[in-house]
């Protein structure tokens, strides 16, 4: 069971308790689970009971008891305990290979890992102003919603700007749609931004800030350095391809094998497992910036993992099972970065 699987299991328990009228509280969009801190119990913990206690007019421990009854015995969960004021602590079934299952899922689905069917049957009709940031945001929201199974139609209030096509945007003709995508305007036209930044930096600059914030569109979006988040994400992706190429030259390939050890590996695994939830949240909230921030976190954690435990042999080391396992984790992160950038309409070059 991955952290994302555990999160969904607890969320289903909340929904069931609400449906049974045992718990009277709004169902959250998602449930956050975290690795248990030193001195804690089990493998993962969640403060969801504390979050729901106020709206439910119950103590957090009472809410935790209600949820424990509905989570205990779920596949992949060995034990559920309550600690402190109402924290839920989960010990996973030792027979469940969460790492192997996650690696297999990413490998099987490739860049489509995280796509789902949560919005199947939904028909979403978005409209936006004749303004470049609104157009790019609506396009990204459409991509995210379609990745979750929705049917999407996007219309523009006015004649589309011909330069939008160079940003990968297709706007449907026909009846007008309600104008629902309203980010703070960019203050420049698509043509001006394209001439100065190019399509990838333009899209990132328009999508990375939350829609209610102004979009910084300076030349720092082109700087090849750690301070430029777009460069960081694409560099981390290209670094994975360099690792795969280096491993091939040394005569070995990746293999999940045993879960890589270390805090950096744990952090990276948690982010990869959370990727489907991040995509769904970005689609539901019409917030491509959530995906952009998630990709930044994956990129930074991947590079930290690489520095802490190189997937390639160093010095006189020979390729080992540990190297193959580390490489598998790095390649999974690269897959997530490529798929996420694609949903934002941004290219993921193998070489920078």
Image (tube, helix red, strand yellow):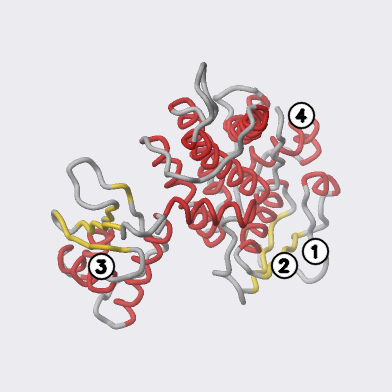
In contact (CB < 8 Å): disc 1 and disc 3:
no
In the rendered structure, the answer to whether residue 84 lies left or right of residue 312 reads left
In contact (CB < 8 Å): disc 1 and disc 4:
no
What residue would you read off at disc 1? 172
Image quadrant where residue 77 sits: bottom left
Q: Earlier in the sequence, mark 1 or mark 3?
A: 3
Secondary-structure class at tag 2: strand
Q: Earlier in the sequence, mark 1 or mark 4?
A: 1
Image quadrant where residue 173 sits: bottom right
Position of residue 257 relative to residue 157, above or below, is above
Examine the rendering and report whether any part of residue 19 can be seen: yes
Q: Residues within 10 Å of mark 4 (few under 14, many from 20)?
A: some
In contact (CB < 8 Å): disc 1 and disc 2:
yes
Cα separation, mark 1 vs mark 2, equals 7 Å
Position of residue 268 relative to residue 246, above or below, is below
Residue located 18% across and 63% down the image: 60
């Amino acid at each position: 069971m991955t952290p994302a699987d555990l999160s969904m299991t607890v969320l289903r328990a909340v929904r069931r308790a609400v449906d049974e009228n045992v718990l009277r509280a709004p169902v959250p969009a998602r449930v956050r689970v975290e690795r248990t801190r030193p001195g804690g119990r089990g493998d993962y913990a969640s403060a969801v009971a504390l979050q729901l206690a106020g709206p439910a007019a119950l103590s957090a421990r009472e809410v935790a008891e209600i949820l424990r009854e509905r989570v205990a015995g779920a596949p992949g969960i060995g034990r559920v305990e309550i600690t402190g004021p109402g924290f839920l602590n989960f010990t996973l079934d030792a027979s469940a290979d969460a790492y192997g299952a996650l690696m297999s899922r990413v490998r099987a689905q490739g860049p489509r890992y995280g796509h789902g069917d949560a919005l199947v049957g939904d028909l979403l009709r978005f409209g936006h102003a004749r303004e470049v940031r609104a157009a790019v945001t609506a396009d990204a929201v459409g991509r995210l919603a379609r990745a979750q199974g929705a049917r999407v139609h996007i219309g523009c209030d006015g004649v589309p700007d011909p330069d939008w096509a160079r940003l990968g945007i297709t706007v449907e003709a026909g009846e007008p749609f309600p104008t629902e995508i309203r980010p703070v305007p960019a203050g420049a036209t698509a043509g001006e931004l394209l001439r100065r930044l190019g399509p990838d930096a333009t899209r990132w600059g328009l999508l990375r800030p939350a829609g209610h914030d102004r979009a910084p569109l300076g030349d720092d979006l082109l700087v090849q350095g750690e301070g430029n988040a777009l460069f960081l994400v694409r560099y981390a992706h290209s670094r994975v391809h360099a690792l795969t190429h280096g491993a091939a030259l040394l005569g070995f390939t990746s293999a999940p094998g045993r879960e890589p050890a270390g805090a950096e590996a744990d952090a990276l695994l948690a982010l990869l497992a959370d990727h489907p939830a991040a995509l769904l949240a970005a689609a539901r909230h019409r917030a491509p910036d959530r995906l952009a921030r998630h990709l930044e976190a994956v990129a930074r954690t991947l590079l930290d993992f690489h520095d802490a435990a190189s997937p390639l042999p160093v010095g006189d080391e020979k390729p080992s099972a540990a190297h193959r396992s580390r490489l598998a984790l790095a390649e999974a992160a690269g897959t997530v970065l490529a798929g996420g950038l694609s949903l934002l309409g941004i290219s993921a070059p193998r070489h920078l």
